[in-house]
Image (tube, helix red, strand yellow):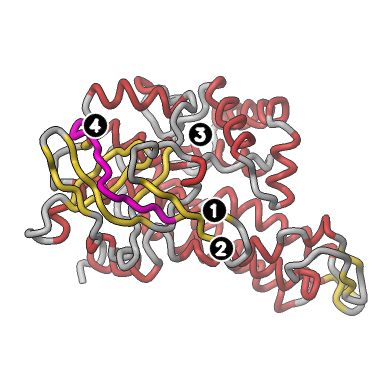
């Protein structure tokens, strides 16, 4: 595998960079840059712009609407989007359910749902975690009992990201309670307008409404909404999670965060010098950059392997672990650089050497606190280490 960019790759990089400069709306990039909460119309607008260019479903095969990019081109695209402060694409339909339907769905499911994901008709959310079934996902208890041509679902899901915007949810449900946990789970598609569904907001530590809990009471879903075979949903769940964990790594977003920390450290003064020249702080930045470069190479290796095998392997757990740890470290460095000015309240705060205003400090503490969750969701980093120990080290 050649990790250097070819002339064709550099031409593609220029194409992406130019398109972003011409088409990424300023009000969207400004919201991303400031760390503000993106509205649903903003996310839908960006989704539609990418779809019109054919650059939305970057992980899908060409026959289903993907752009047919190489792994290096996918890496370049993510890197350039982050550099331009483009928002992260909502992953649940495009990067999670889409690949699942392409591999496990029926032709009818593919023909109906995939175009609706692309054109924005459907906004999907994920119904995996439950109270008591997070990292130990196989212990889930949401029950689906077959009644003729329908399943009747009762139970609860939690940490449902952006569910307040969604009209659909894909769920893991228990269809056979009398077998080994992993063998009695099915993967079902549910319309959120179905009677018996209630969604309640969960406020996070920084005050944002990003996640929800969802309650199912005698919810009737057509059996035709089953993806794959009944009681074989665990295989689908693992397949989806490998795609999710690759996305959580967020290489491009960490590259963006690294540049922001460097710029901040050049601006902040400690005593008579700049913070970036302080040996201990500079060493932490250097270590984060070294780790990030190593992760970039690993990410490319994973992309090449996924292209050859059709799906990422268990090595994606490495990306999930390192990606979240690096991103958290960079957010912590930014918080430390700002010192008291990183406090989560508006107004001007002076550290004696420079004056920070709202434009400098806005959302910094919120970013830091929000990113504490990344090493937990998608399978906690402790669980990922167990996966690596079993599957790769065979211990």
- What is the secondary structure assignment of the residue under circle 3? helix
As measured in the structure, the alpha-carbon distance from the residue carrying label 2 to the one carrying label 4 is: 35 Å
Q: Tell me the mark number nearer the camera, choosing from 1 and 4.
A: 1
Residue placed under numbered mark 4 in the picture: 105
Residue placed under numbered mark 1 in the picture: 210
Asked if residue 116 is positioned above or below residue 142 in the image, the reply reads: above
Query: Which of pointers 3 and 2 lies earlier in the amino acid sequence?
Result: 3
Query: Which of pointers 2 and 1 lies earlier in the amino acid sequence?
Result: 2
Residue 365 visible in the snapshot: yes
Find residue 73 and name its label.
Answer: 3
For image coordinates 71% across by 31% down, the residue present is: 25
For image coordinates 70% across by 78% down, the residue present is: 280
- What is the secondary structure assignment of the residue under circle 1? strand
Residue placed under numbered mark 2 in the picture: 204
As measured in the structure, the alpha-carbon distance from the residue carrying label 3 to the one carrying label 1 is: 30 Å
Query: Which of pointers 2 and 4 lies earlier in the amino acid sequence?
Result: 4
Are there few (<14), some (14-19), or many (20+) residues within 10 Å of tag 3? some
């Amino acid at each position: 595998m050649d990790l250097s960019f070819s002339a064709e790759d550099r031409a593609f990089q220029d194409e992406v960079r130019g398109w972003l400069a011409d088409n990424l709306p300023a009000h969207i990039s400004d919201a991303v840059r400031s760390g503000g909460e993106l509205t649903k119309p903003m996310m839908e607008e960006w989704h539609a712009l990418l779809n019109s260019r054919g650059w939305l479903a970057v992980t899908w095969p060409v026959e289903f609407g993907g752009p047919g990019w190489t792994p290096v081109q996918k890496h370049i695209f993510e890197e350039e989007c982050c550099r331009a402060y483009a928002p992260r694409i909502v992953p649940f339909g495009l990067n999670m359910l889409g690949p699942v339907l392409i591999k496990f769905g029926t032709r009818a499911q593919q023909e109906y749902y995939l175009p609706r994901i692309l054109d924005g008709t459907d906004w999907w959310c994920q119904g995996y975690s439950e109270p008591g079934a997070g990292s130990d996902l196989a212990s889930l208890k949401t029950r689906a009992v077959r009644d003729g041509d329908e399943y009747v679902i009762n139970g609860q899901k939690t940490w449902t990201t952006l569910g307040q915007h969604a009209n659909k949810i894909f769920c893991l449900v228990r269809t056979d309670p009398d077998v080994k946990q992993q063998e009695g789970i099915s993967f079902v598609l549910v319309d959120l307008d179905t009677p018996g569904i209630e969604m309640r907001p969960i406020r996070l530590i920084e005050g944002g409404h990003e996640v929800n809990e969802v309650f199912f009471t005698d919810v009737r879903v057509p059996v035709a909404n089953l993806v794959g075979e009944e009681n074989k949903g665990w295989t689908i769940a693992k397949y989806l999670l490998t795609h999710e964990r690759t996305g959580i790594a967020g290489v491009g977003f960490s590259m963006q965060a690294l540049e922001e920390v460097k710029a901040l450290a050049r601006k902040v003064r400690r005593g008579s010098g700049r913070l970036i020249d302080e040996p201990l702080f500079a060493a932490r930045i250097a270590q984060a950059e070294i780790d990030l470069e190593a992760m970039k190479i690993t990410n490319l290796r994973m992309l090449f392997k996924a292209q050859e095998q059709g799906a990422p392997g268990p090595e994606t757990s490495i990306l999930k672990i390192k990606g979240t740890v690096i991103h958290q470290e960079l957010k912590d460095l930014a918080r430390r650089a700002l010192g008291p000015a990183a406090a989560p309240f508006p107004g001007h705060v002076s550290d004696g050497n420079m004056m920070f205003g709202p434009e400098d400090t806005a959302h910094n503490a919120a970013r830091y606190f929000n990113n504490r969750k990344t090493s937990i969701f998608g399978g906690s980093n402790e669980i990922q280490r167990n996966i690596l120990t079993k599957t790769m080290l065979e211990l």
